[in-house]
């Protein structure tokens, strides 16, 4: 466990050292999301304590999740091992990674602020509260559970659908285990809106309340109204495409292990060709508005379907000048359905 109390994250130094001592890699690539790059020197100090001395390279690229494992970077520099900080292994990996890989979740070790606990109790409604968290904050769930039960609420921490996930954990594209758990209020403990918005998309019911418990802001934020706004916008895009049928679509697939989805690509390609739509298939490591605009100059599709990550159309590409769809939305358009699907 991390000893430096000024950095309240457990980087599990003993696991890092055991990994290096066991596999004796010659060259390690260390990958961290931008929000945890401040842990870099702490990890390097941990590695210094190991007798085996591998070469170390730090990836400066962003890391958007366990799906975004930097295999290509490791291959380019000749690294034979990857230490990926901030996530647990991704359940939907499409192909075998031929590098020894260690995932370190970097659990938050600070206490849940008393003010936040009070705000959570004042924000929730109904009798049954479903508790979830992004991976760094799953250890706070038991503390919040005890507090709410002391206030008279029934609480549920959903069981994970995959062995790679912790109890109560949500990923940006894995929420079905939470959606299948009956509750009145759903809480996501995190340090930003990303995971809570994903839960909104999975549970579009008007009767449910979605609350973000932001550890670092010390705030409980009711996102129910924002959820309805986002869902309404997404259904509007879908309905517009249903009423003005597209002639061409482009399917954009990722290339990293958790973002390359060949079976999904095949399914959507055949679905659209079956209704007489011309389909282009494109691969890219990353996608943003500038990259998509350049792609559009070439193929000029009527709509773009993003397979890399279902959050890209909703977050980063929501204001692109042409419709950009999640896989679930693409199925809705092809089948002329308005019951919202997220993510696939």
Image (spheres, helix red, strand yellow):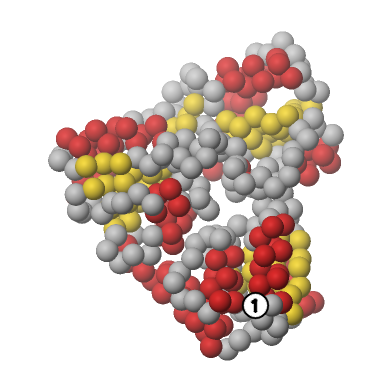
Q: Is mark 1 on a helix, strand or loop?
A: strand
Q: In which quarter of the view is residue 295 placed?
A: bottom right
> Label 1 neighbourhood size at 10 Å, few (<14), some (14-19), many (20+)?
many
Of all residues, the one furthest to the bottom in this rendering is: 244
Residue 84 seen in the figure: yes
149 sits left or right of 256 in the view: left
Residue at which label 1 appears: 303
Q: How many labels does the image show?
A: 1
For the residue pair 155 and 317, the one nearer the viewer reads as 155
Q: Which residue is drawn at 59% across and 45% down?
A: 65
For the residue pair 58 and 92, the one nearer the viewer reads as 92
159 sits left or right of 18 in the view: left
Of all residues, the one furthest to the left in this rendering is: 152
Q: In which quarter of the view is residue 141 placed?
A: top left
Q: Residue at x 39, y 54 (%)?
A: 179
- Vertically, is 72 above or below 235? above
């Amino acid at each position: 466990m991390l000893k430096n109390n000024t950095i309240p994250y457990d980087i599990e130094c003993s696991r890092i050292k055991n990994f290096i001592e066991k596999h004796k890699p010659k060259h390690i690539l260390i990958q961290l999301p931008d929000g945890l790059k401040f842990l870099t020197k702490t990890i390097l100090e941990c590695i210094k304590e190991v007798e085996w001395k591998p070469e170390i390279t730090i990836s400066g690229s962003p890391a958007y999740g366990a799906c975004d494992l930097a295999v290509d970077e490791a291959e380019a520099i000749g690294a034979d091992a990857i230490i990926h900080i901030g996530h647990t292994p991704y359940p939907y990996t499409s192909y075998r990674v031929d590098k020894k890989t260690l995932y370190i979740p970097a659990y938050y070790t600070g206490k849940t602020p008393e003010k936040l606990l009070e705000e959570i109790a004042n924000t929730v409604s109904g009798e049954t509260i479903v508790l979830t968290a992004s991976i760094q904050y799953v250890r706070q769930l038991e503390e919040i559970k005890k507090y709410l039960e002391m206030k008279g609420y029934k609480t549920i921490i959903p069981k994970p659908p995959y062995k790679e996930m912790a109890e109560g954990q949500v990923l940006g594209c894995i929420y079905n285990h939470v959606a299948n758990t009956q509750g009145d209020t759903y809480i996501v403990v995190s340090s930003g809106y990303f995971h809570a918005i994903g839960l909104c998309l999975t549970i579009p019911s008007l009767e449910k309340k979605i609350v973000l418990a932001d550890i670092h802001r010390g705030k409980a934020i009711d996102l129910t109204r924002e959820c309805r706004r986002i869902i309404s916008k997404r259904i509007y895009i879908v309905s517009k495409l249903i009423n003005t049928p597209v002639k061409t679509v482009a399917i954009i697939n990722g290339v990293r292990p958790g973002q390359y989805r060949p079976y999904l690509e095949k399914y959507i390609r055949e679905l659209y060709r079956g209704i007489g739509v011309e389909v282009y298939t494109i691969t890219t490591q990353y996608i943003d508005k500038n990259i998509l605009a350049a792609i559009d100059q070439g193929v000029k599709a009527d709509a773009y379907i993003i397979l890399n990550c279902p959050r890209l159309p909703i977050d980063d590409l929501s204001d692109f000048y042409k419709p950009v769809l999640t896989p679930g939305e693409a199925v809705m358009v092809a089948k002329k359905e308005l019951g919202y699907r997220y993510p696939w």
